[in-house]
Image: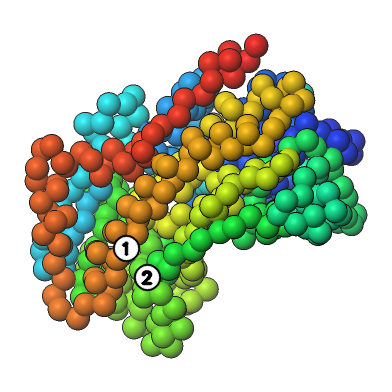
Amino acid sequence: MTSPPEDHGAGSLSRSVQCCIAGCGPAGAMLGLLLARKGIDVLVLEKHGDFLRDFRGDTIHPSTLEILDELGLADRFLALPHSKVSTIMLRSTSGQTISLSLSRLPTKFPYIAFVPQWDFLEFLTAEAQRFPTFQMKRNAEAVDLIQSGGPGGAGGAGGVVSGVRYVDADGAHDVTAPLVIGADGRTSRTREAAGLPRIESSPPMDVFWFRVSRRPDEPEAVAGRIGAGKLCVMLNRGDYWQIAYLIPKGGADRVRAAGIDAFRRDVASLAPELSDRVAEIRDWDDVKLLTVRADRLTRWHKPGYLAIGDAAHAMSPVGGVGINVAIHDAVVAANVLWRPLREGRVTDADLARVQQQRERAVRIIQAFQSVVQTRFLKPALESTRPATIPFAVRFVTRVPMLRDLPPRLIAFGISRPHVDRQIVDRR
């Protein structure tokens, strides 16, 4: 793991900036870097002291690697400890197997890079620290927006945002800014304060995350396993498998009540090759629950405020695309907004352009995830019969004209944005 960079300007934090970003996840870190490259005075607030969180998404897809390459950062990024996967396999307990390959995709990076998200975020913020206009404040939680009509949202959905309030060890502080970016995740405080309308869907599953050791001779692939009423996905993390074990929505207490031994047996029945290693799951403290949710703002912005990443659209874990969708948001936001920010004239029309350029891709990906969840995952989790891979899935993987469509969607999304050439050149 890389060492955390020192916060720029520690002890002399600006109280007024051109752009304040709430949240230093993938969207916030990337946007902060891109804006700093163009000389925008940007402050990023991160509520934690570091980025160390278990089982955060860490799949860096080809589209994100291409963006890093455009910035001249791909080689340095890939020097971090990582594993590469170009094959996605699914095997049923009845013996059926299918595979999808990224190796035929038209890209310099025909693979998914697995890098712990904390290393990815430290890498981006360390690069951003090279620019004097970038500031990051750790242990600083954005709790409210400063709006016309007063803090706490008194201005209502129609108010104008002029800054953000954050809390640290010294108490509450206000930062004024012509633009506040809400990149504070799926439980976004800034989004709630902005009062933007949201629609939610109901994914049919939750996920238990855990890890077991991996042997060097085991496949370097994303390995899915499907059994009667059981599903898991095994992610190659070099010396261990990071495993997502799917359960019916709200079923965590029932699974826990059956006991850890029963859980180990279920894992072994689904992935027999792990039978000699399931004892590494010592107790329920080794198993983390991810409550799966998906939602989308119908309006991502109001005057002075824009939501991106999970704050604008919480993604299902299907396809592992969440980081990359968030990065795409950040690139588009930087491309659209750096000039208005530098000229001091950000309008609501500028913010609307970001949503217009990103919303279609987000909606299509969420629709794809919903189809996978309702047509494949939900029936599989409810089934008591011997597991089989649905015919439609097998058909797609056998037809040359169709077999590369799912890998392409996972690798690139619906549209892959490119960094504005003037941001790349930094002039």
Say whether residue 245 is visible.
yes
Position of residue 67 in the picture relative to residue 30 (left or right): left
Specify the label residue 66 is tagged with: none
Q: Is residue 260 shown above or below 90?
A: below
Q: Residue at x 37, y 70 (%)?
A: 204
Quadrant occupied by the C terminus: top right
The reply to whether discs 1 and 2 touch (Cβ–Cβ < 8 Å) is yes
Place of residue 228 in the rendered image (x, y in percent of width and height, measured from the top left): 20, 75
Say whether residue 121 is visible.
no
Place of residue 4 in the rendered image (x, y in percent of width and height, measured from the top left): 68, 40
Specify the label residue 373 is tagged with: 1
Specify the label residue 204 is tagged with: 2
- Disc 2 marks a residue whose amino acid type is Pro
Q: Is residue 259 shown above or below 398?
A: below
Q: Closer to the camera, 414 or 79?
A: 414
Q: Residue at x 63, y 32 (%)?
A: 350
- Image quadrant assignment for residue 417: top left
Place of residue 100 in the rendered image (x, y in percent of width and height, measured from the top left): 21, 45
